[in-house]
Amino acid sequence: MEQSSFDQVGLLLNQVGSFCLYIKNFLEEKYQLKERIFISKCFRPVFSFCLLLLPLICVLLVALPNKAITQEIEVQEVQPEIAPVVEIQPTVPEPLKDCYWAVEQVFPQHLWSQAKLVVELESGNRPYIVSKPNRNGTTDVGCFQLNRGLEFYGDSALDPLYNTQVAYRMYLNRGWRPWYAVCPIDKSNPYGMC
């Protein structure tokens, strides 16, 4: 809808009047002035300035119409872009790589229960455990508590899979005898595995 120049002048007069009223209220609040005489002395120059500007602005609006003011503004409706649907493939979490997992990767299935018993008794299924020093000063490391594991195998002895692979090779050579938790030194056979 197009506004005429006279409507614009009316709006401008309304805005100038609001501005003058704002200045009056500001002066009253700031200086706590209640006397009309002093207010009118302070307010008169501001009001006179506003009145001087008003005719000039009106002449400019009528004589030189601005296309941006007088033309109707075209409103274009903007459609939001819809993001393409991306299908997310669920990922299956990697199995927990603890000692029991390593036993199932290395030992044949018929030995799983015995190997897991050794792991439970030796390390409590804690792959990164290092024992306190033994009587001879050596330490036992990892799932199967390999004696002197760090000395012989380095940090690999703390890897559950590597530790279990070493233990399986030991089992193939000597059975469960290297693990005193299931095959005590006193030759008793509490688990029937020696």
Image (cartoon, grey):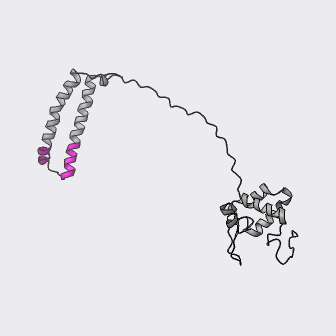
Instruction: List x then y, in percent, for residue 167.
Output: 77, 63
- Specify the farthest residue to the front: 152
Instruction: Using the image as rendered, state which of residue 155 and residue 76 is in the foreground.
Output: 155
In this figure, what is the number of numbered marks? 0
Q: Is residue 38 magenta?
A: yes
Q: Is residue 16 above or below residue 172?
A: above
> Which quadrant, please, contains the C terminus?
bottom right
Question: What is the quadrant of residue 191 in the picture?
Answer: bottom right
Magenta stretch prevailing secondary structure: helix
Instruction: List x then y, in percent, for residue 136.
Output: 71, 77
In the rendered structure, the answer to whether residue 130 lies left or right of residue 62 reads right
Residue at 84 percent across and 56 percent down: it is 109
Q: Which residues are magenta?
A: 22-42
In the rendered structure, the answer to whether residue 165 lies left or right of residue 12 reads right
- Specify the farthest residue to the right: 192
Q: Is residue 175 above or below residue 3?
A: below
Q: Is residue 64 above or below residue 28?
A: above
Instruction: Using the image as rendered, state which of residue 126 and residue 52 is in the foreground.
Output: 126
Instruction: Using the image as rendered, state which of residue 175 and residue 45 is in the foreground.
Output: 175
Q: Is residue 118 magenta?
A: no
Q: Is residue 107 above or below residue 83?
A: below
In the rendered structure, the answer to whether residue 5 lies left or right of residue 102 reads left
> Which quadrant, please, contains the N terminus?
top left
Residue at 19 percent across and 48 percent down: it is 27
In the rendered structure, the answer to whether residue 73 lies left or right of residue 37 reads right
Instruction: List x then y, in percent, for residue 122.
Output: 75, 69
Residue at 56 percent across and 34 percent down: it is 83
Instruction: Using the image as rendered, state which of residue 65 and residue 166 is in the foreground.
Output: 166
Question: What is the quadrant of residue 176 in the picture?
Answer: bottom right
Question: What is the quadrant of residue 110 in the picture?
Answer: bottom right
Instruction: List x then y, in percent, for residue 140.
Output: 71, 70
